[in-house]
């Protein structure tokens, strides 16, 4: 890739919609500022549930065409965020959604969970060496909430970062590149508590939800003092909400809140938070820019 912008951000996610829920405002902000934002999605989410009744036929136990539909939703979400570089790891459908923890789909040889980590990481190395990001964002080692594909995405992303920097590894994939900073998604406990307090106070105003989720349903909740970056992405909250709405089979957005297929409302965070796990902070914590201190 030639004429790369000065700031380059790579995000690695498990399924379509994960990027918008976790990092939509961050992606929109950096894209608007002229950074090169690359999204790599590892599966098409073929095993997901479907919210609109008229699309129920897409599910894996019926037409098994949900993956194709979710790819279209992902493209629409990226248009809302202003992101033009979005890719599927290994190509469309190369790795299949593994389903929730303990599901029979975990054992499907086509599933991402069953993929060889180094093989999957090699596909990501090619992207890293082409785009040469200074910053990588993915999940924590538990995948935020224990989903097999989220755990695998963390393992693949972290391994790919190692391999991409190794001078003797697969020089046919491009020149070695070391990612300066790696962040894991997180949400501080205080923000979760405040968000649910707002939702409980306004519950009667959101009849689209069948109830209220538990704070433990929010992925990646950490003690406040573990958060190392807080981004003022609220001005891009509308773009994030629009991107989440684009994932209509998976998400219902109502004001400042949203629900997944269980119908339980939870906060839509327009300020986004991160934990630095590789690299050096660019100043006092918490940082307000993922690129703080980046010089290359």
Image (tube, rainbow, N blue to C red):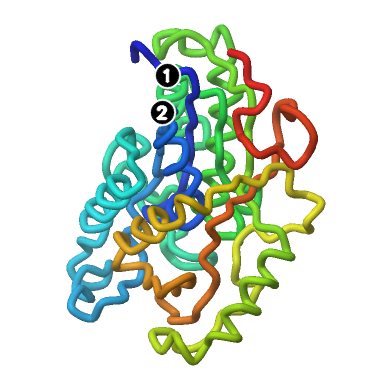
Q: Position of residue 134 (x, y in %)?
A: 56, 23
Choose top left, top right, bottom left or bottom right for residue 49.
bottom left
Left or right: 51 in relation to 228: left
Of residues 265 and 89, which is closer to you in this image?
Answer: 265
Residue 33 shows in the view: yes
Report the residue marked by disc 2: 34
**C-alpha span from label 2 to label 1:** 7 Å
Image-quadrant location for residue 27: top left
> Are the residues tagged 2 and 1 within 8 Å (C-beta)?
yes
Place of residue 92 in the rendered image (x, y in percent of width and height, measured from the top left): 27, 42
Badge 2 marks a residue whose secondary structure is loop
The spot of residue 60 in percent (x, y) is: 27, 67
In the figure, is residue 13 to the left or right of 141?
left
* 21 to 12, vertically: above or below: below
Q: Is residue 287 left or right of residue 165?
A: right
> Which residue does the image show at 42% across and 33% down from the upper left?
37
x, y percent for residue 8: 48, 25
Q: Residues within 10 Å of mark 2 (few under 14, many from 20)?
A: few
């Amino acid at each position: 890739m030639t004429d790369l912008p000065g700031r380059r951000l790579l995000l690695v996610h498990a399924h379509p919609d994960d990027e918008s829920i976790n990092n939509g405002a961050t992606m929109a902000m950096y894209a608007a500022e002229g950074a090169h934002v690359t999204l790599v999605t590892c599966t098409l989410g073929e095993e997901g549930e479907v919210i609109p009744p008229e699309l129920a036929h897409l599910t894996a136990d019926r037409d098994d065409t949900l993956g194709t539909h979710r790819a279209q939703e992902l493209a629409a979400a990226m248009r809302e965020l202003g992101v033009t570089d979005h890719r599927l790891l290994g190509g469309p459908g190369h790795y299949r959604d593994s389903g929730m923890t303990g599901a029979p789909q975990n054992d499907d040889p086509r599933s991402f969970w069953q993929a060889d980590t180094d093989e999957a990481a090699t596909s990501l190395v090619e992207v890293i060496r082409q785009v040469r990001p200074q910053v990588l964002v993915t999940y924590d080692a538990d995948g935020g909430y224990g989903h097999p594909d989220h755990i695998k995405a963390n393992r693949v992303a972290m391994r790919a970062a190692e391999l991409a920097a190794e001078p003797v590894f697969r020089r046919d994939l491009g020149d070695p590149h070391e990612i300066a900073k790696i962040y894991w998604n997180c949400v501080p406990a205080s923000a979760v508590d405040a968000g649910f307090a707002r939702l409980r106070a306004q519950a009667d105003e959101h009849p689209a939800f069948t109830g209220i989720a538990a704070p433990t349903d929010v992925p990646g909740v950490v003690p406040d003092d573990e958060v190392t970056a807080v981004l003022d992405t609220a001005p891009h909250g509308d773009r994030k909400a629009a991107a989440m709405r684009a994932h209509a089979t998976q998400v219902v957005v109502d004001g400042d809140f949203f629900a997944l297929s269980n119908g339980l409302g939870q906060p839509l965070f327009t300020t986004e938070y991160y934990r630095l796990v590789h690299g050096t902070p660019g100043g006092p914590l918490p940082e307000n820019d993922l690129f703080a201190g980046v010089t290359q």
